[in-house]
Amino acid sequence: MNDAESRLREALEDIVDGVNVKRAKHELLHDGRDLTTLFLEVLSEQGYLPVTVGAVQVEPGERVPAFLLVGTTAFFGWVFWEQFTSWKIRKLWGSVIKNARGDWDIQIPEARATTIYANASLKLEMDIDHPPAF
């Protein structure tokens, strides 16, 4: 691997790890080159597996980091349980990017068959009554 390849891989690792860069929306193009395949390799190396939201093992009060790939764009978000009332909750993937109303700009419910790349070993606790802005 040459020096340019190493730097590209390091940059993608930073995105996956959330180091030196905010994980949000990332275009996987560099000088006209599609880096999607390399990004998928890095995700796999970092323990991110292709799954559906429904398959992610997460309990209410927990969240799991995950990426959604749409074409050559990677979106970061979390799989978690959103609580509406003490008895009404739903499991979803929500992007860290918010819309004008302050809600998750992209949402994937657990019943949808969309593939995301999640790392359940990086599961974190969260306050289900007051979810963070992520």
Image (cartoon, grey):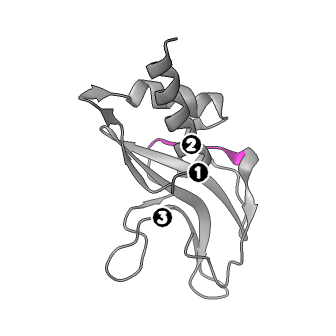
Camera-near label (3 vs 1) is 1
Residue 96 circle label? 3
Name the residue beneath numbered marker 1. 18
Question: How far apart, in angstroms, are the residues tagged by discs 2 and 1?
Answer: 6 Å
Question: How far apart, in angstroms, are the residues tagged by discs 3 and 1?
Answer: 12 Å
Name the residue beneath numbered marker 2. 14
Camera-near label (3 vs 2) is 2
Counting from the top left corner in percent of width and height, residue 68 is at 44, 47
Dividing the picture into quarters, in which one does residue 29 lie? top left
In percent of the image, x 49 and y 53: which residue is there?
Answer: 76
Q: Secondary structure at mark 2?
A: helix
Q: Are marks 2 and 1 in contact (CB under 8 Å)?
A: yes
Q: Residues within 10 Å of mark 3 (few under 14, many from 20)?
A: many
Amino acid type shown at disc 2: Asp
In percent of the image, x 42 and y 77: which residue is there?
Answer: 103
Query: Range of the magenta residues?
Result: 115-120
Q: Secondary structure at mark 1?
A: loop
**Residue 108 versus residue 89 in the image, above or below:** above
Counting from the top left corner in percent of width and height, residue 82 is at 58, 74
Q: Are marks 3 and 1 in contact (CB under 8 Å)?
A: no
In percent of the image, x 43 and y 70: which residue is there?
Answer: 104
Amino acid type shown at disc 1: Gly
Compared across the picture, whether 20 is left or right of 68 comes to right
Counting from the top left corner in percent of width and height, residue 27 is at 33, 43
